[in-house]
Amino acid sequence: MKIEAQAALVTGGASGLGEATARELARLGAKVAVLDRNLERARQVAAEIGGTAYACDITDTASVEAALDAAAAAHGPARILMNVAGIGSAKRIVGKDGQAAPLEDFARVIHVNLLGTYNISRLFAARCAKLDPLDGGERGVMVFTASVAAFDGQVGQQAYSASKGGLVGMTLPMARDLAQHGIRVCTVAPGIFATPLLLELPEPVQQSLAASIPFPPRLGKPSEFAELACHIVTNGHLNGEVIRLDGALRMAPR
Ligand SMILES: NC(=O)c1ccc[n+]([C@@H]2O[C@H](COP(=O)([O-])OP(=O)(O)OC[C@H]3O[C@@H](n4cnc5c(N)ncnc54)[C@H](O)[C@@H]3O)[C@@H](O)[C@H]2O)c1
């Protein structure tokens, strides 16, 4: 699908990989709606790229419906959904104090990363399926953001890895479900990227993370994630696939 002039939605577009994706979509001529829990920051990004911003919690159906309605009123119905919103977590299943990890912590991460992504995707897909097909029968494209932790999760990453593994697992069945509607679904599994959280780490920690990447031995650039996410949109034969974007990194246990 050509990105130019299409309406696109970016969850988590207020920061990091989502922000870079919103910027790249705008650079390629899309009408971009930045959907994020952080409305203030979403507005700043949107203002800089000539897009619009909406407060949206992907886990809350009413909030998602309201954001989809408002974005459609501003830009017309969206055919592109970039699912980038997500949260991290680090908690051992048995803590140093011998206590079991609280179930709520695990549930919170699954709730945002897996259920939230599924929630907005199902609502987007239902709308997209009603649109007229473009050339070749295509109606829309969705991208999920997993992580290499879906495959090689580290100590303390059970919840995060399970949530991202869930996205990996639903990629193919969702692509199969939506094939009849001409909607493609792909997932990007990033390695270690230079987003605000990582850039806050002490310089030696950043350097050691970078050195763990076979090649290139540096943190991924958010723009590299954004380029791949946009390539998935333009390459009509990419579907049902999970693509690692990690410089051949395989995470160690800790
Ligand atoms: N940065 C990395 O190295 C890296 C590596 C692998 C995967 N990822 C994944 O990439 C995605 C983006 O990561 P990032 O580093 O850019 O993070 P970030 O914290 O910079 O940005 C995430 C954005 O998502 C928003 N968000 C969180 N929960 C939300 C919700 N319920 N509804 C709407 N918006 C919500 C936040 O407000 C924030 O703006 C995440 O899914 C993360 O798991 C990041």
Image: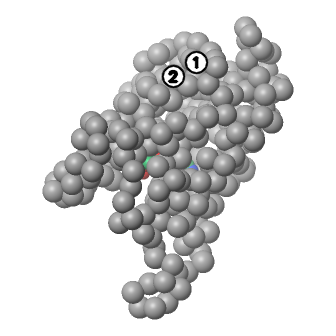
Rendering quarter of residue 7: top right
Q: Which mark is residue 231?
A: 2
Q: Are marks 2 and 1 in contact (CB under 8 Å)?
A: yes
Q: Which mark is residue 235?
A: 1
**Residue 25 vertical position relative to residue 59 in the rendered view, above or below:** above
Numbered disc 2: secondary structure: helix
Q: Please state which of residues 135 and 26 is positioned toward the viewer in this rendering.
A: 135
Q: Quadrant of the C terminus?
A: bottom left
Residue at 51% x, 22% y is 231
Q: Please state which of residues 239 and 86 is positioned toward the viewer in this rendering.
A: 239
**Residue 178 vertical position relative to residue 170 in the rendered view, above or below:** above
Q: Which mark is residue 151?
A: none
Q: x, y (%) of residue 187?
A: 58, 38
Amino acid at dot 2: His
Numbered disc 1: secondary structure: loop
Amino acid at dot 1: Asn
Q: Is residue 220 left or right of residue 2?
A: left
Q: Please state which of residues 133 and 58 is positioned toward the viewer in this rendering.
A: 133
In this view of the protein, can residue 75 be seen by the observer?
A: no
**Residue 171 vertical position relative to residue 58 in the rendered view, above or below:** above
Q: x, y (%) of residue 153?
A: 47, 60
